[in-house]
Image (cartoon, rainbow, N blue to C red):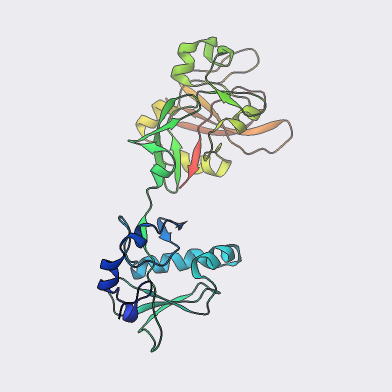
Amino acid sequence: MKFCGVVLLAFISAACAAASPSKASNSSANLKIGANQWTLRNSEVCPADYHVPTLNEWTDLSKNLIGKKQKSVRSKFASGKKTLYFRLDGSENVIAYNPKTAQIKTLPLPQKKTSETRCVKKRDLLAEHGVENGLYLDKRNGRSYPVRVLGSKLWLSENLTIQVDSKGNASKISDFKNCYLESAEFCEDFGRYYTWQEAKKACPAGWHLPGDAEWRDYQKSLSQSEWKNIGRGGVRTWDSYGDTSNSGYYWSSSSTSKSTARGWSFTQSSKYVERDDFERSTGMYVRCVADL
């Protein structure tokens, strides 16, 4: 007898796999959780690049599904039954999954019960954020930026260079008054100066202006090469420019008053980092960050 779609004793029926392999490849519904991507539909054979989950992967899944905020995700994954049984890689036992609590445990498959197979694969988090060969392409103006991974954050390693209007619409820079010495050459080299209101709207979709806490984490891991990169370009006030060859000033998304916002400055010669509040009209740089 063939058991297509369900598995007895936690094993896929070879006959099912041979009879209808196309059904597995059409299992496109998925759930991205942590470092993994799970199929939501029951499979007979895992699609290419997917595999039957290990106990560690099931454990990671359950940790991410526990809590009231994940209620809708749990219902999508588990279809509302009291207990579901899923195949476990490399074992004759199965995973018993409680959809209500998202708790899992391993046990032999109970008599008269059937188990299903869900599939999982490792996510390519960089590709999901538009990064290829170490570069992020900002499709708004065709400019590519090198990226840097720090913990669970992905940072652009160069200052943003794009023009934004009051509504947040972005385009190639055509007016260079917001560049050092109002020069297109320096805009290309250092990036563009932004007011705080502009900075909040400047990053591409999926990216954001770093908050104060994110800058705190960033400055803890500055290498020598990064100092040379971030410690330049200066700052623009209403009537002058700062030290462009030795320091760089950057906006955060944090603010403590109606007239100022939090910024960070980096001085490469002394390896000095300072955090201060600046008038929102000050011209400072933007580094965008994304959550992995």
Identity of the residue drawn at 49% across and 29% down: 266
Spot occupied by residue 53 in the image (x, y as percentages of width and height): 35, 66
Identity of the residue drawn at 47% across and 66% down: 63
Q: Nearer the viewer, residue 66 or 287?
A: 66
- Describe residue 240's horizontal placement relative to residue 132 as left or right: right
Q: Is residue 245 visible?
A: no
- Describe residue 252's horizontal placement relative to residue 231 as left or right: right
- Describe residue 88's horizontal placement relative to residue 63 as left or right: left
Q: Nearer the viewer, residue 190 or 44?
A: 44
Spot occupied by residue 223 in the image (x, y as percentages of width and height): 37, 35
| Whether residue 234 is situated above or below residue 168 in the rendered picture | above
- Quadrant in the rendering for residue 14: bottom left
Spot occupied by residue 243 in the image (x, y as percentages of width and height): 51, 18
Spot occupied by residue 247 in the image (x, y as percentages of width and height): 48, 23
* Extreme-right residue of the structure: 258
- Describe residue 80's horizontal placement relative to residue 278 as left or right: left
Q: Is residue 110 visible?
A: yes
- Quadrant in the rendering for residue 193: top right
Identity of the residue drawn at 42% across and 65% down: 60
Identity of the residue drawn at 62% across and 27% down: 198
| Whether residue 269 is situated above or below residue 45 in the rendered picture | above
| Whether residue 268 is situated above or below residue 220 in the rendered picture | above
